[in-house]
Amino acid sequence: MERVMKNKTAVVFFLFPSFVLFTLIIIVPVFMSAYYSVMDWNGIGAKTFVGLSNYIEMLSDTNRFLPAVLHTCFFAAASLCIQLPFSLLLALVLAAKVKGERFFLTVYFIPVVLSAVVIGQLWMRIYYPRGGLLNTLLINLGFMDKAQPTAWLGDIRTALVAVTVPILWQYVGYHMLLYYSGIKSISPDIFEAARIDGASFWQMSTRITLPLLKPILQVSLTFSVIGSMKVFDLVKVMLSDGGPSGSGEVITTLLVRRMFYPSNRYGYGSAMAILLIILCVVLYQSVGLIFRERRGER
């Protein structure tokens, strides 16, 4: 293997197919989107060069685009403040060799492999105003009037939070498995030595596990932030028109709405796609910079 890696011809030979696919699937579409973003084009007819007009119109759209950006940032904040800490807590508990460890790992990971359509339909039934599991539970507990049940997905005050919950729930198991694998890769001798010295579970978690998990934390944080920027499927399934008055609209759903039916503004949608790419790259670099600085301080 070492001899193959030293052979530059062999390295190029094995990497070339992947490079071609990456170029065709990622690089070329990005440059094409950048080209279309300065055009007024419906995707079929003639193109008209409009310069930065699409970007200016997009950034000045306070009715749809800017609220969609805020909603997307809300998803990211909820993921960072709720999903990741909860996933880490689950991983710490399960890695402590609790009874039924494998069973719970499987159960928590099941939502990750389910289709977004299935999850969306499941949670829509939970949120049904009449007969839904959530309202039925709240009515029986006396927190809601049976004559006036809450339409969680149809109320401008609750639509965004209602669609956030299943998105967080779906990927808790994914991040938990990342953390769990990282914890299991730490030498048991380190924890055994800490136990002999009288360290508690909390002390071992904060002073041993978390510092050694920094590479995994960086990967998980990156996936979480970038994934929040690209959230689409569950929002589309549960809030087909962006929710009441666009209260659950995110960048990706608005992008599709502008690019295709009913707007057919492919150039405008491409401008939104380019801005989303820039935003993802900036966030990715920011996460890397944060962890790089922390490693440097240590």
Image (spheres, rainbow, N blue to C red):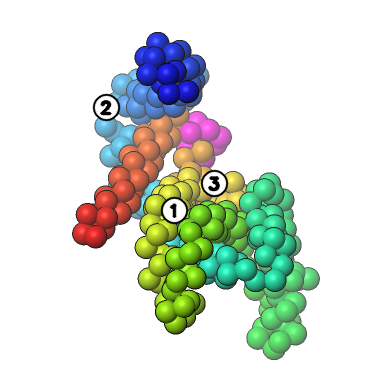
The residue singled out by tag 3 in the image is: 232
Q: Residue furthest top?
A: 9
Along the line of sight, which residue is nearer the eye, 224 or 14?
14
**Residue at 65% in and 86% down:** 143
Amino acid bearing label 3: Phe
Secondary element under disc 3, as helix, strand or loop, is loop
Q: Residue furthest left?
A: 297
* Magenta stretch holds residue 202: no
Q: Is residue 134 visible?
A: yes
Q: Nearer the viewer, mark 2 or mark 1?
A: 1
* Magenta stretch holds residue 261: yes
Looking at the image, residue 155 lies above or below residue 144: above
Instruction: State the extent of the magenta-drawn residues as a range.
Output: 257-264
Amino acid bearing label 1: Ile
Q: Earlier in the sequence, mark 2 or mark 3?
A: 2
Residue 131 is left or right of residue 179, and the answer is right
Q: Earlier in the sequence, mark 2 or mark 1?
A: 2
The residue singled out by tag 2 in the image is: 51
Q: Which mark is residue 216?
A: 1
Secondary element under disc 2, as helix, strand or loop, is loop
Q: Main secondary structure of the magenta part?
A: loop
**Residue at 47% in and 40% down:** 255
**Residue at 65% in and 71% down:** 98
Looking at the image, residue 1 lies above or below residue 119: above
Are the residues at dot 2 and dot 1 in contact (C-beta closer than 8 Å)?
Answer: no
